[in-house]
Image (cartoon, helix red, strand yellow):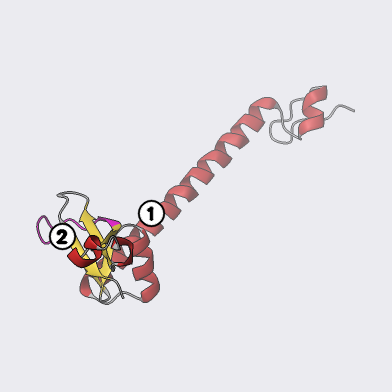
Amino acid sequence: MAKTCAQCGKPLSFLERIGSNSCAECQAEIDHKQAEAAKAESESRARLEQEAAEKRYAAALRGEARPDDLGRLESDGYLIAGGRLIVCPVCGHDRFHQQRTLMNTRTATFFNLDWADSGADTRICQRCAYVMWFARK
């Protein structure tokens, strides 16, 4: 007895019998529905993550964010200092590049000991290139 498609009842070819219980048309429809469901789930996850990111950002602006949220914001390029989100004092932008900078002194330079000088962390605004200096702890 020939095997038939589980959805439409059409007889299956030899190759279709090996692969699944569906004919090519029904299998294409099943694959399409699964792809749509996966896309909808992905969009839902992205929307939830966006909402969570917005809540973290708002809490950081108010100074009420949890330490793990602050760490996540900092890894995204935001500047966190004293448990608060810092914005550029010139343009108000909130994203910065981080750079370590060596602070040279005249004496160390004279004796060719620049490598022994202390350094600082600088944050450079991604919009206007304003530089903020922070002492290392």
Q: Which residue is mark 1?
A: 47
Q: Nearer the viewer, residue 68 or 45?
A: 68
Residue drawn 18% across and 64% down? 106
Q: Quadrant of the C terminus?
A: bottom left
Where is residue 48, by image quadrant? bottom left
Where is residue 33, by image quadrant? top right
Q: Which residue is mark 2?
A: 88
The answer to whether the residues at label 1 and label 2 have Cβ atoms under 8 Å apart is no
Residue 52 visible in the shown view: no
- The picture places residue 76, in percent across and down from the top left corner, at 35, 57
Residue 111 visible in the shown view: yes
Q: Residue furthest left?
A: 90
Tally of numbered tags = 2
Q: Which stretch did the figure color magenta?
A: 89-98
- The picture places residue 10, in percent across and down from the top left corner, at 74, 26
Residue drawn 27% across and 75% down? 83
Main SS of the magenta part reads loop
